[in-house]
Image (cartoon, grey):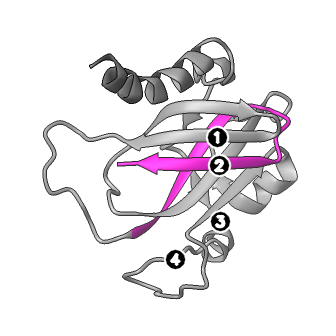
Amino acid sequence: MNKLFLIRVLPVLIPFVICTLGGCDMDISKYNVTVVETGVKFKEDFVMANTVYNPMKNKDETLPKFRTHIIKDQSKFDEVFTAFPQIDFKKEMILIYVYTCYYNGRPHKIQSVELDGKILKIDVKLKKQGLVVGDMSSPMHRFLVIKMDSLDIKTVKFEVFE
């Protein structure tokens, strides 16, 4: 009985303990991570240039399944947005994740943020609204926009869970 318990519990417990004791930096509030869902308007050229694979619409398998952008300065910002809530690039940056989504009515909720050197990993959950049944839609091109403290990163990796 004890061996079976250890075989099932240790693989889950060890990563939890390591991250809890400081092996992973997963504190969302530490970086002031905020999902920006209102007040954002993209330039049409940017939207068109960031098409991703969609099995129902374009069926072009050469397109990437997702795209990510890190915006840390005004010049890049001006290439992407026509409207955005206030941002101070001396202290903040914008992350954009473009992907195909089947649950377009669900808001994004940040689950965890992990900084590993120059790589930032963000786990996101699509939050159900109440007792939702049957809210799946035809796949759509969706933009996740995050505003957060500026970090010295080269890569951002997103994982979106339903």
Marking on residue 157: 2
Image depth: mark 3 or mark 1 in front: 1
Image depth: mark 1 or mark 4 in front: 1
In this rendering, position of residue 86 left or right of residue 12 = right
In this rendering, position of residue 35 left or right of residue 109 = right
Kindly state the secondary structure of the residue where label 4 is placed: loop
Camera-side residue: 73 or 83? 73
Magenta span includes 149: yes
Residues in magenta, as a range: 140-162
Query: Which quadrant of the figure has residue 64?
Result: bottom right
Q: Which residue is mark 4?
A: 53
Neighbour tally class for label 2: few under 14, some 14-19, many 20 plus, Cα within 10 Å: some
Q: Is residue 16 visible?
A: yes
Q: Which residue is mark 1?
A: 121
Q: Are marks 4 and 2 in contact (CB under 8 Å)?
A: no
- Please state the horizontal and vertical placement of residue 105, each as a whole percent of the image: 31, 52
Kindly state the secondary structure of the residue where label 2 is placed: strand
Residue 10 drawn above or below residue 50: above
